[in-house]
Amino acid sequence: MNKNKATMNIRSLLTCVFTISCLFSTTSFAKTVRAPLAEKRAIFKAAGFQFHHNKWQSECGEPTLELYQDINHDRLPEAIVSSADTGCYGLTGMGFVLLSKTAQGVWRVRYDGTGVPELLKSTGKNRMPDVSVGGPGFCFPVLRWDGSNYRFHRYEYEGKACQIGPP
């Protein structure tokens, strides 16, 4: 076996192991997130899922409520909904929607994308936590809340700055 083929096989194996470990390390496998039924319905609907044949779903699978709590201490809950499907999300295998409940009681999408979310201790505007968006590899984008949207802020791996590509 030549060196390039061996490298490709190792990369394929590592990507597969990473994807499987991410899917099994998400909070949906670790614990059940509790939320009132009416809140779950409102969250899933705001996240773009449809209620069909007695369950919530989309073209990318069934949703899992990963988080339901006040993460920025404004006395209003936030939620993270994930779904897993390599057909939709590629090698990362997971997508997520981060939502906030407004003072008017309406759920609003704050971010919707591919990756494995990790809430960090660092914060943006209104004390919303930065979000590391994990996936295959070793250097992940970190998003920061600017008061209107989560936007790219930096790259980070295990709490340290990193960069993608040549310096």
Image: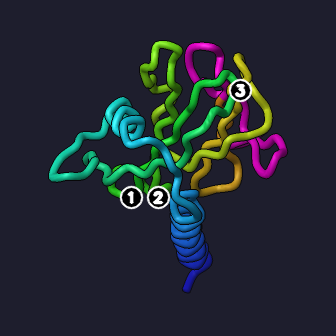
Q: Point out which mark residue 73 bears.
A: 3
Q: Is residue 157 magenta?
A: yes
Task: Give the Cα separation between the discs numbered 1 and 3.
Answer: 34 Å
Residue type at mark 1 is Thr
Q: Residues within 10 Å of mark 2 (few under 14, many from 20)?
A: some
Position in image of residue 121 (x %, y %): 79, 37
Position in image of residue 39 (x %, y %): 41, 35
In this rendered view, identify the residue nearer to me: 72 or 153. 72
Q: Disc 1 vs disc 2: Cβ atoms closer than 8 Å?
A: yes
Q: Would you name the residue on which mark 1 appears?
A: 86
The magenta segment is 144-167
- Tell me the quadrant of the picture where the N terminus can be found: bottom right
Relative to 70, residue 64 above or below: below
Task: Please identify, in this view, whether the residue under mark 2 or under mark 3 is nearer the observer.
Answer: 3
Instruction: Indicate left or right for 151 with 105 as reference.
Output: right
Q: Residues within 10 Å of mark 3 (few under 14, many from 20)?
A: few
Q: Would you name the residue on which mark 2 appears?
A: 91
Instruction: Indicate left or right for 96 with 153 as reference.
Output: left
State which tag comes first along the sequence, 1 or 2.
Answer: 1
State which tag comes first along the sequence, 2 or 3.
Answer: 3
